[in-house]
Image (cartoon, grey):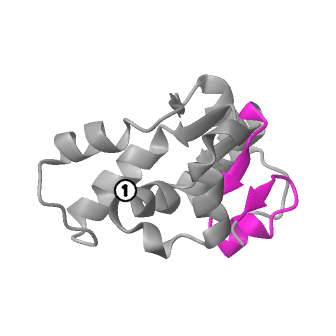
Amino acid sequence: MKYLLDTHTWIWWQMNPSKLSEKVTQLILDTENYDELLLSSISPWEFCKLLEKNRLGISCTPEDWLNSALDMYKLRLVDLTPRIAYQSTVLPQPFHSDPGDQIIVATAREEKATILTKDEKILNYKHVKSIWK
């Protein structure tokens, strides 16, 4: 079993885990019940864009925050491969046009992973597995 952390799930786990659902918190903590936690390589970029837009604040350098946040047990950063890039542009419709979400969904589909997300658009998308509650 593999879980892919949506960007907000990864950030909240690091900064404010109380924002996560009880189910997602338990899934992440129960490391014996999954092989890997995955993170799309688009997520660190999305985090940096939130900093750039002053939607997040941190008390260290972005590089230090990222290095620490990527040091999670069983976490693997999934590269944006040419295949995932292409797959993100041909997802079964209907799906919305946010490129970050398209890459995250394509990554989950490629890796056969379940996305841990609060995003209703992803939760309601029938072409990928996702969990929140």
The answer to whether residue 97 shows anywhere in this view is no
Say left or right for 115 vs 42: right
**Which of the 4 quarters of the picture holds residue 52?**
bottom left
Q: Height in image: 132 above or below 38?
A: below
Query: Relative to the observer, which residue lies in front, 20 or 110?
Result: 20
Residue sitting at 77 percent across and 40 percent down?
A: 109
x and y, in percent, of residue 76 in the image: 52, 30
**Quick check: 53 above or below 129?**
below
Q: Residue at x 38, y 45 (%)?
A: 44
Q: Residue 66 falls in which quadrant of the image?
A: top left
Numbered range of the magenta stretch: 111-131
Residue 127 magenta: yes
**Where does residue 87 sit, x and y in percent of width and height?**
72, 37
How far across and how far down the image is residue 86, in percent? 68, 34
Residue lying at the far left of the rendered structure: 60
Q: Which residue is mark 1?
A: 14
* Front-lying residue, 20 or 127: 20
Residue at 35% over, 55% down: 47
Q: Is residue 42 magenta?
A: no
Q: Quadrant of the N terminus?
A: top right
The C terminus lies in which quarter of the figure?
bottom right
